[in-house]
Image (tube, grey):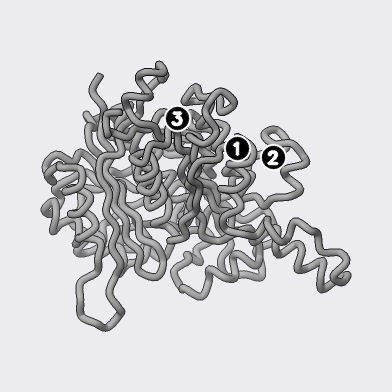
Amino acid sequence: MTGRHVVTGIGVTAPNGLGTERFWSATLAGRSGLGRITRFDPAPYPVTLAGEVRDFAVDDHLPRKITVQTDLMTHLALAASEMALADAGIDPARQPEYEMAVMTANSSGGNEFGQREIQALWSNGPRHVGAYQSIAWFYAASTGQISIRHGMRGPCGVIATEQAGGLDTVAQARRVLRGGTGVVLTGGTDASLSPYGLVTQMPTGMLSRSADPDRAYLPFDIEACGYVPGEGGAMLVMEDEGAARARGARRIYGEIAGYAATFDPRPGSDRQPGLRRAIEGALADARVTPDEVDVVFADAKGVQGADLRESQALAEVFGPFGVPVTAPKTMTGRLYAGGAALDLAAALLAVHHSVIPPTTNVARLAPGCDIDLVRDVPREKSVRTALVLARGHGGFNAALVVRAVRD
């Protein structure tokens, strides 16, 4: 045991690419997965765009006996988990079952499955509601189904802190590894694009109402008008570095080196938001200084006030324009519990390949957004240390540092 916790496998289900290679290629090429909602007719709704995982055929990934019991959020999590395990070269059947754990993030629950069953209830009566309604909607369903499918009987759990959950759950996975568990599948996926799911998001007032996919999600831009919702996410395989090397791991993408979380004060309290403290806490946990950070993967809400506050926190820690900043989620939308997990996957790939993916479509930075935003094309750069930020609705802040591992 080295005490260093590393990522050895990545699985991605994203609107702009199914599978890690397709996602990464699309991201570096600036190809967006945003478009008009196709799962239902969005015409009656003020929000018509989303990041849908359009090339996902569930029967290609999962048996029918599982798909009828579960919601799309779980289908995406199971598929990403299979990809991550294959990427890591781990066969769960050959691992001690009580030394494998599952930690996922979720925010919306299985609302598409739930809406279908509620419609059956009101249209045809209680006898037409399926027995699986009792479990498919549950925000812990993905953790449970992954655990059952792969025989992972070690510590299992779920964290529900909206966008921040994708980082919070990785930090929990690190704690589980410190406790002696051998392998943890961690990350998050969400799928909240049913009519019911969309309606529950709209009261925040933060969703973009633009019908132009190229102008709908513009974080830090002077024309920022909200964010585009999306679905999908990423799952990661985490191990102790020494154990990974001892088993002959195919590759090590990077180390989960530091983490911190804070909670914003009550609105109107005149106290400062907690994002800066989260950044400083994560850097201290990783024992790195601001000048050692090569790139920041921003939360990038696309809401002018929130963007300004994030820019100010970055400027306070790194100095104005002091560190490259990117937000590849402009190509996927905000995936809620899956969003930060996908950003973390992108950060690990940036470290692994020494390239910073771009932020697309942002033309003019808003006043006060004094950041070195990587725009439109990738930036070739040695990336040894990356910082990933996430803010969840309601005041959650999380920051996580990933670092290259020397052979």
Front: mark 2 or 1: 1
Front: mark 3 or 2: 3
Please state which of residues 32 and 60 is positioned toward the viewer in this rendering.
Answer: 60
Image quarter hosting the C terminus:
top left
Q: Are marks 3 and 1 in contact (CB under 8 Å)?
A: no
How many numbered marks are there?
Answer: 3
Residue at 16 percent of width and 48 percent of height: 284
Q: Earlier in the sequence, mark 3 or mark 1?
A: 3
Q: Earlier in the sequence, mark 2 or mark 1?
A: 2
Please state which of residues 45 and 189 is positioned toward the viewer in this rendering.
Answer: 189
| Amino acid type assigned to the residue bearing label 1 in the image | Ala
Residue beneath label 2, please? 58
Report the side of 291 relative to 4 (left or right): left
Against 357, is 204 above or below? below
| Amino acid type assigned to the residue bearing label 3 in the image | Gly
Please state which of residues 285 and 22 is positioned toward the viewer in this rendering.
Answer: 285
For label 1, the SS is helix
Report the side of 39 relative to 223 (left or right): right
Residue 9, numbered label: 3
Q: Point out residue 198 in the picture as x, y percentages from the top left corner.
A: 59, 65
Residue at 60 percent of width and 37 percent of height: 79
Q: Are marks 2 and 1 in contact (CB under 8 Å)?
A: yes
| Amino acid type assigned to the residue bearing label 2 in the image | Val
Residue beneath label 1, please? 79
Q: CA distance from mark 2 to mark 1?
A: 8 Å
Query: Dividing the picture into quarters, in which one does residue 92 lie?
Result: top right
Q: Point out residue 59 in the picture as x, y percentages from the top left corner.
A: 73, 36
For label 3, the SS is strand
Residue at 46 percent of width and 42 percent of height: 186
